Amino acid sequence: MNKGVIMRRRIHFFMCSFFVICGTLCGLYHDDGFAQRTKSSQQAGEQRKAEKGLKDNERFFYYINFSVSNSVVEQERLVCRKAILYDMFARFLYMKFRFNDAYKQIRKSQELLIELYTMVLSREIEEGKKLLDSVSPGPIMKNDYVSKHYCNLGYSNNEQAKIYMVMADNYRTSLYSMRLYKYIQALKKAKQAKRYAIITYVTFRDKEFKKNSTIKDKVNDEPYIYSYLKIKLEAIQDENEKKYLLNILGDSYYQLYNDYSYYDDVWSNGSLHELPEYAEYEKEEE
């Protein structure tokens, strides 16, 4: 055989062998790199999910805290305390970079928040209805247009709160965040109903409100109308009635009685040792 042909075949063989080896090595490196990227992507996804859950919880606790802090209902506070502790534990795990474990505790916290919102909303809606029923007879009997208008707005908001609550109850049970955001809408409407009940009470008794167009124009200016209503309620002679209506007014405008926050109290005095899951975590860390 021609020497040139033999030489070309040898060169071809060596080149093929070289490319096969390089391809194998590259494949091994690619598989290892792909595995690393997959693991990193998964961890990043878990981090984003936990981070969003913690941010959502801040909003959920913010709105429910006023109702729980301003009304001493023992069962509501027990459920709220446990929900706060699970949220605290989730934040602790998040800082330890255990994002998946943190998200599990977030879900436990939100499950309790759903129970809490349901309890609080049922109470708020019922209280709003009773308050509206107590202030409505005067405006209706006297056919006071302005007072009746605000009373109707109160009943309308109370009914909307019921509708939003039913909507949240009927969302898929696993959609915790979606349900809780709808419960917040319901809670806002329930508090708005109480606010209109107070406005009805004041407008029916206050001739200045009906005559002064500036006051009526500023009824949606929350700081202004809150201050105005507070001044009028503080003039009530009956101390029990005054305290009761001032408390309702403050709560409807998201004010804390005596600046007491149940959420802050649990954060200051609560302990993760109250949770069985934290005891399990400590055993794992030993």
Image (cartoon, rainbow, N blue to C red):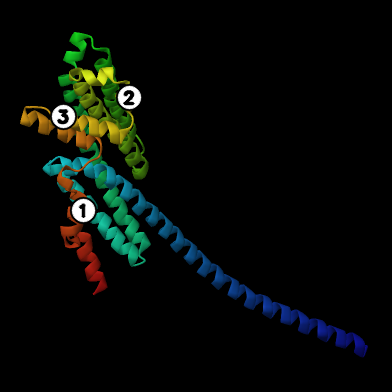
Q: Position of residue 103 (x, y in %)?
A: 34, 56
In whole angstroms, how far apart are the C-alphas of marks 3 and 2? 19 Å
Q: Nearer the viewer, residue 185 or 23?
A: 185
In whole angstroms, how far apart are the C-alphas of marks 3 and 1? 29 Å
Q: Quadrant of residue 92?
A: bottom left
Outermost residue toward the right?
Answer: 2
Label 3 belongs to which residue? 233
Where's the N terminus, which quadrant? bottom right
Q: Is residue 270 visible?
A: no
Outermost residue toward the bottom?
Answer: 3
Q: Residues within 10 Å of mark 2 (few under 14, many from 20)?
A: few
Q: Earlier in the sequence, mark 3 or mark 1?
A: 3
Q: Nearer the viewer, residue 181 or 254?
A: 254
Point out the frontmost of discs 3 and 2: 2
Q: Amino acid at mark 3?
A: Leu
Q: Is residue 46 left or right of residue 169?
A: right
Label 2 belongs to which residue? 214
Q: Quadrant of residue 272?
A: bottom left
Q: Position of residue 43 (x, y in %)?
A: 44, 63
Label 1 belongs to which residue? 264
Q: Amino acid at mark 1?
A: Asp
Q: Is residue 143 above or below residue 132?
A: above
Q: Amino acid at mark 2?
A: Thr
Q: Position of residue 214 (x, y in %)?
A: 32, 24
